[in-house]
Amino acid sequence: MNTYIFLGKYGEIERGEYPDATAARLRAEALALQGPGKSVEVARW
């Protein structure tokens, strides 16, 4: 598992340790919450 931090328009959305597939799903959900034309950066280590 890797530690991921999801960063949106207003800062950190979520942080935790997830398998890669779960992190991909969470990124998609976070991106949907940000709205059209927005982005979600994902830091992984």
Image: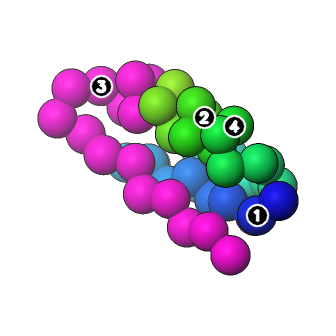
Which residues make up the magenta segment?
Answer: 31-45
Circles 2, 4 touching at the beta carbon (< 8 Å)? yes
- Camera-nearest label, 4 or 3: 4
Residue 42, position as x, y percentages in the image: 50, 59
Binning the other alpha carbons within 10 Å of mark 2 as few (below 14), some (14 to 19) or many (20 upward) gives: some
Q: Are marks 2 and 1 in contact (CB under 8 Å)?
A: no
Label number found at residue 26: 2
Callout 1: SS:
strand
Residue that numbered label 4 is attached to: 22
**Membership of 37 in magenta stretch:** yes
- Distance, label 4 to label 3, CA atoms, is 21 Å
Q: Residue at x 78, y 49 (%)?
A: 18
Instruction: Report if the CB atoms under discs 3 and 2 are less than 8 Å apart.
Output: no
Q: Residue furthest left?
A: 37
Q: Which mark is residue 35?
A: 3
Q: Earlier in the sequence, mark 3 or mark 1?
A: 1
